[in-house]
Image (cartoon, helix red, strand yellow):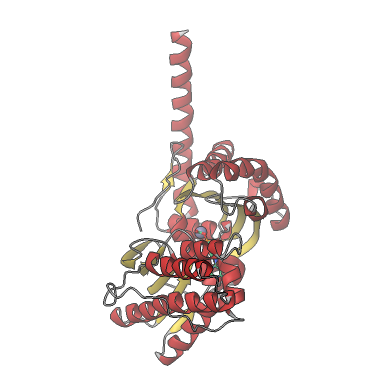
Amino acid sequence: MVIVAIFNIKWYNKIMENYFEIAQEKFKKLQKKENVLILGIESSCDETSISIVKNGREILSNIIATQIEIHKRFGGVVPEVASRNHILAINTVLEQALLEAKITLEDIDAIAVTYGAGLVGALLVGVNFAKAVALALELPLIAVSHIEGHISANYLTHKKLEPPFVCLMVSGGHTAILKIDNYTTHKLLGSTIDDAVGEAFDKVARVLGLGYPGGVEIDRLAKLGKPTIKFTKHEILKDSLNFSFSGIKTAVINYINNQKQKNQPFCIEDVCASFQSLVVGELSNKAITACKLQSTKKLVVAGGVGANSFLKQELTRLCKENNIELFVPELKLCTDNAGMIASAGYYNLMANKNLSDLTLTAKPTVKL
Ligand code: KG4
Ligand code: ZN
C-alpha cells in the first residue's frame, strides 16, 4: 500500500515537472509570437466568465454567465451557492466562448485565470478548471490578480491607451487610487480605510429595500431625485487620498431608521441622489487631486462602480476643467468579465511575469 502511494506521488510529481518545463519553454516562445490568443477565466464572485482575447486588446468572445437572479432572493452573494453554480456553468461557458470566437482549444496559446481576490470557493472553481485545461493542452498558465484585470478592461475599450496613468479603482471589493507605471506594476496612492464603495452602494440599497445588486438601482433612482439631504461627511481624511465610506453609509442608514421611527415619510429618490452625490464627490475630487499630484493628464476608471452614470458625468466635467483625458471601460466591461483577465494575462506574458505551475491556488485577498 505504502509503495503504491509513494509510486503515485512520484509519478504525479514527474507529470507536474514535465508540464512546467514545457510551459516555461512555450511561455518564452509566445513572447515573440505575432498573434497570441489567451483564454481568460474569471470566477471570483457571482459571474462565471470565459473569454478569448487576441494580443491583449481584441475580444474574440467574452461569455458571462451571471448568477444575479440566483442570489437576488438571498439579498447578496451566498459563497457556497456561488461555487456550486460556477461548477454547473463553467463547461458550457467554455463551449460558448470557443464557438463564438470560431476557434478550437488547439488554437489557444495560454490560459489566464483570476487567482484572487474574491470568494475562495468561487475562485477555486476557475483556478482548478484552468489548471486542468493547461495540463491537458500543455499550455502556460498565467495567474492574474482581479484588480489588475479591472484595470486591463480599459485596454480592451481604448485601443491606444498605454501606461503611465492614474487609476481610480472602484469595485465591490476595492476602492483605491493607483499610479499605473506600466502594464504590470503600480503604486498605491490611497485606498479605503473601511468599506469599498460598491459595498457601500449595496448596503444602502439593501436598507432601502432595493434588492441585490444595489448600485445600479441607486444610480437609476438618483436620477429621479434631488441631493437635498445633508448626510454628515468624514472630514478626517480631507487632505489625504484615502477614503472612508462606512460613516456615510451609517449616516444614511440612521436617517432612514429615524424617519421610520418618527413615522415620517422620506423620498427614496432623494436619499439615493444625496448618498450618490456625496460618494461621487469624494471619489472624483480625490482622483483629480491625484492626477495633479502625479502631474498626469490621464485618468482611468476601473471596477463595477465605473458603470455609475453620475460618477462618469462628474469625472467628465472635472477632467474637462482640468485638461485631463478620461478613460472608462465600456459598460459591460466595468463589471466582472474574463476579457479583462485575458488582457491582463497577455501583458503579464509580455512582461515575463506570473507564469504559474500546477500548485497555483486561490487567494481571498490580494495586496493592492
Ligand atoms: O467590479 P465588480 O463587478 O465586482 C468586484 O470586483 O467587486 O463590482 C461590483 C460592484 C457592486 O457593488 C455593484 O453594486 C456596483 O459594482 N455597481 C454599481 C453600478 N453598477 C455596478 N455601483 C453604482 N452604480 C452603478 N451603475
Ligand atoms: Zn470585480
* 337 left or right, relative to 237: right
Asked which quadrant contains residue 83, the reply is top right
327 over 137 or under it: above or below: below
Q: Work out which quarter of the rendered image holds the C terminus and state it.
A: bottom left
Residue at the location (54% across, 37% down)? 135
Mark yes or no: residue 347 visible: no
Which x, y percent locates residue 230? 43, 80
Residue at the location (62% across, 81% down)? 224
Which x, y percent locates residue 26? 49, 46
Which x, y percent locates residue 78? 56, 46
Asked which quadrant contains residue 163, the reply is bottom left
21 over 47 or under it: above or below: above
Which sits in the foreground, 224 or 357? 224
Among all residues in the image, which is located at the extreme top? Answer: 1
Mark yes or no: residue 137 visible: yes
* 126 left or right, relative to 356: right
Residue at the location (43% across, 32% down)? 17
* 179 left or right, relative to 30: left
Which x, y percent locates residue 194? 36, 61
160 over 71 or under it: above or below: below
